Image (cartoon, rainbow, N blue to C red):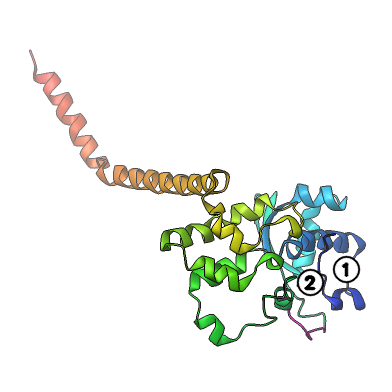
Amino acid sequence: MGYTQIPNWLLDSPNDLTCAEERVLMRIYRLTIGYHRYEYNISYAKITEMSGVQKVSPIMQSLRKKGFINYNANNGKISEIKILEPVTSGHHTSNLRSLHQSPQVNGSRPAKETIKDNINKDILFIEFKNRYPELRFDETDTLDAWRTLTLPDRKLAVAVMEYQNNKWVDTEPKYIRKASNWLLKRTFDDDDIRKPYEDKLRRKKEKIEQQKYHREAEEDAASTEEIKEILFEAKRRKCSSP
C-alpha cells in the first residue's frame, strides 16, 4: 500500500495554516514528495480536484509567503511548485533532503552518500539518480547498468525522466521498475517517452529558427529613407516615360 512521507514538524506542532491551506499543502506533498521529487508542474485544477478547495491561487500565494512552498506561475493555471521547509517553523532538526535518504526496500542503497561516493560517479549519473523515484533506485545494480550505456544513451535517459515521471504520477512505487531494470530494458528509448522529449526539442529549434528569421528579415529590411528614395525614383521614372 502506498504512502507519502510528511515531515514530523508539520504534524507535531502548530503550523499557522488555515484548513484550506493545509488541505492544499497536503495535496502538493502527495504530488511531489509522494513521487520522490521536490518540484513538479501542477495545475490548479488538479489541486482543486484533489482537495476540494476552490480559488487555489490566493492559497498558493499564502503558502509561499509563509515559506512552505515556492513556485513559478504560468498564466495562473499551472505552476512549477517546489516544497520548502518553512524558516519560520522553528523546526530545523531535519531537512527535506532526508526524505531522499531512506533505505531501499531491498537494502541495497546506503542511507547517506559520502562526498567520495559522489566523486566516483559522473554528473549525469547523479542527475539520473536525483530524478528517478527514490524507493525504486537500486544503486549498485543501477550503476553497473549505467556503465554499459553510451554517452548519448545516458544523456537521453536523464532527459526523458521528466516524461517518464509524468506517466508514473498515479502509479504506486511498488509497480515502478527498479532503475537498473529500467536502464537494461532501454525504457528511455520507448517511443511514448522519447517522442514527447524530441517534440519539445523540435519546437524549441523551430522557435529559435523563427526568431533568427525575423531578426535577419529586420536587419535586411530597407530603412525609411531607402523606401522614400525607391518610391521617389519609381515616381520619377513613371513621369518621364512617354
Residue 44, percent across and down? 75, 51
Say left or right for 195 vs 179: left
Please give the residue where the numbered disc 1 appears in the rendered image. Answer: 17
Query: Is-magenta flag for residue 97?
Result: no
For the record, the magenta segment spans: 90-96
Residue 199, percent across and down? 49, 44
Q: Tag 1: residue type?
A: Leu
Viewer-proximal residue among 129 and 22: 129
- Picture disc at residue 203: none
Q: CA distance from mark 1 to mark 2?
A: 9 Å
Which comes before the other along the chain, label 1 or label 2? 1
Q: Residue at (65%, 62%) from the top-left corner? A: 178
Disc 1 + disc 2, Cβ < 8 Å: yes
Q: Is residue 234 above or below residue 3?
A: above
Label 2 crowd (10 A; few <14 / some 14-19 / many >=20): some
Q: Is residue 226 above or below residue 201?
A: above
Residue 58 found in image quarter: bottom right
Residue 140 makes an appearance in the image:
yes
Q: Residue at (74%, 59%) from the top-left corner? A: 173
Q: Is residue 232 above or below residue 128?
A: above
Residue 159, percent across and down? 52, 58
Please give the residue where the numbered disc 2 appears in the rendered image. Answer: 66
